[in-house]
Image: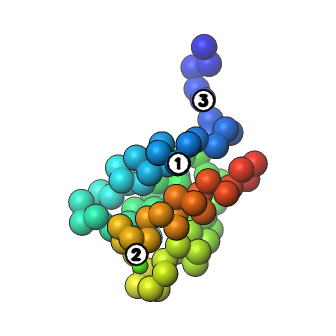
Amino acid sequence: MPVHQPMSIMPPAKTVRVRLEKADINGDGRLSVKELKKLFKEMGSNWPGVRTWLCMRNADGDGDGEISASEMDNLVAYILNWTGA
Ligand SMILES: [Ca+2]
Ligand SMILES: [Ca+2]
């Protein structure tokens, strides 16, 4: 059993969603730039700021700078598309 398992294999959508829900630190049901960035850092991303920016560009449908519950599906789909990144 490996002691440390990096995010080299893309997790299923459900796992991604659970992680995103846990990333909502202030519990308002929305993911802010700050909360997303922290999550990507924890996931071991080399460029959490860039990742966050790309996520916002792709998933933040109404452009208010936060991922709401209805935009979460877009974000999950986008993250699952990162295969190999
Ligand atoms: Ca939040
Ligand atoms: Ca939004």
- On residue 5, the disc is 3
Q: Mark 3 belongs to which amino acid? A: Gln
Residue found at x 40% / y 46%: 18
Looking at marks 1 and 2 on the same chain, the residue that comes earlier in the sequence is marked by: 1
Tell me which colouring the rendered structure shows. rainbow
Q: Which residue is mark 1?
A: 13
Distance from disc 1 to disc 2, alpha carbons, whole Å, reads 20 Å
Q: Is residue 32 left or right of residue 28?
A: right
**Circle nearer the viewer, 1 or 2:** 1
**Mark 2 and mark 1 in contact (Cβ < 8 Å)?**
no
Looking at marks 1 and 3 on the same chain, the residue that comes earlier in the sequence is marked by: 3
Distance from disc 3 to disc 2, alpha carbons, whole Å, reads 29 Å
**Farthest residue toward the left?**
27
Mark 2 element type: strand
Residue found at x 71% / y 50%: 83
Q: Give the mark count.
A: 3
**Farthest residue toward the top?**
1
